[in-house]
Amino acid sequence: MANPHSVPEPLDHHGGSRPRGIDNVPRSSTDTGRFGRMFRRLPPLNPSDQTLTALADSMGQGPQPVDNPDIPSGYTYLGQFVDHDITFDPASSVERANDPDALHSFRTPRFDLDSLYGSGRQDSPYLYDHDDADKLLVGRNTGPQFEAVDLPRNEQGRALIGDPRNDIHVIVGQLHLAFIRFHNAAVDLLRSRFMHPDEIFDEARRLTCWHYQWVVVHDFLPRLAGADVVAEACRQPRFYTWKRQPFIPVEFSAAAYRFGHSMVRAGYKLNDTLPVIPILTDIRVPNPIQHLGGFRRLPARWTVQWNLFFAVDGSTPQASQRIDTRVAEPLRKLPPGIDVPRRSLALLNLLRGRALGLPSGQAVARAMGTPVADARLGLSGEAPLWFWLLREAEVLQEGGRLGPTAGRIVAEVLVGMLRGDPASYLRLAPGWKPELPSARPGRFDMADLLRFAGVA
């Protein structure tokens, strides 16, 4: 059997370096680090390679993934954008060399959009418009083979953005561009109000971050975990606590928050002029640009039409896939650029969970008081945490949202990180309400954010 502590390298790259600290996760509550554990006393589950391979194979067999009309497909990629935001690590190469495990020199996980702003205008000047330093730079392509408006890129087509992972594919790249344009729209609004020039950038950043944070708490999370679970996590967190500063629990990062992998569609319609395009390279398609992979200039006519991904002005967007134990066909055999052995994404997730010493799903549910009989879930024996949480959603919620165990973990961690951020609206102004225009007074969701950014 392979070394159970070996870690599949490509899974955490997603176009960037692996987050520091993910391979050194202490069980002691007195240790500090970027990553930690919610359930330190639970024993790790150590299934064999054969068991994990068989389990991963089962996730691509049987019925095809089913649409989930309750969650538009755009939220799959908002979730990826959020993940990149809270795990972004702008530490210098010297800091990484001195502290590769992120035990001391690491950025506390926050919803502060540093994947967008980098280290600020002085230290990351390439992210900002040279002619208007209050604004983030928007890219302009030339030539009929490319879309004119894009992420800013160098001459080789690589995106000039804070986090290279946000260029991994077209959808998340265009979402990053939408946030750039949201900030720039906030700058224009503040200037129209004759705000003092020295205050405009900081206020535009605050407006961008706080409205983004609001969307995560009041739009994204309720769809995934349920409004009641989110409200309870806001009132009384029970499982995600810390002594010094927030950390990223591996039960969250390597299991509960990987629900999005089951929500991915095999392909997406970007706009009304294009057919459905595969999310990853399809070996049956001879033209290599006929997939949504990134790290290149945006092809002509590929601008995302966001009303196909979110419900904008009454549109009917493409649905995500149900949260269950099925993964889309392109994820069953990953392209060589992601994983040279061409394993499935499901297998890589299961191997990662074992390498990190995650407990079984049954053990975590018992610890949280949310156990479900194995017979009801159709399981025999202890199951890996990631698989168990997907099965819980599949059986208890018919795949429409997360089950009680995963929902509570995701809600507590995301809300808890926001509480731990000294610049967040929950910390500075818990009673704050969105200030920008919205379709419904007192509400602000992704459709409103995209509309204000001028991309809807």
Image: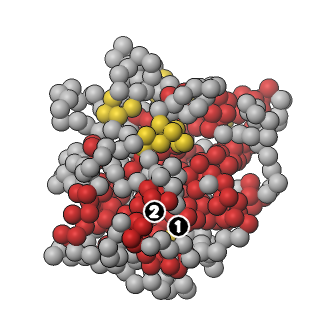
- Image point (66%, 54%), residue name: 227
x, y percentage for residue 22?
41, 68
Q: Which residue is mark 2?
A: 392
Residue 444 appears in view: yes
36 lies left or right of 100: right
At label 2, counting other C-alpha atoms closer than 10 Å, the crowd grade (few under 14, some 14-19, many 20 or more) is: many
Compare residues 244 and 395 and report the one nearer the observer.
395
Q: Which residue is mark 1?
A: 405
Query: Tag 1: residue type?
Result: Thr
x, y percentage for residue 202?
72, 44
Which quadrant would residue 254 be assigned to in this image?
bottom left
Compare residues 439 and 223 and report the one nearer the observer.
223
Query: Tag 2: residue type?
Result: Glu
- Image point (55%, 76%), residue name: 368
**Eyeballing the image, is 421 above or below 264?**
below
What kind of element bears circle 2? Answer: helix
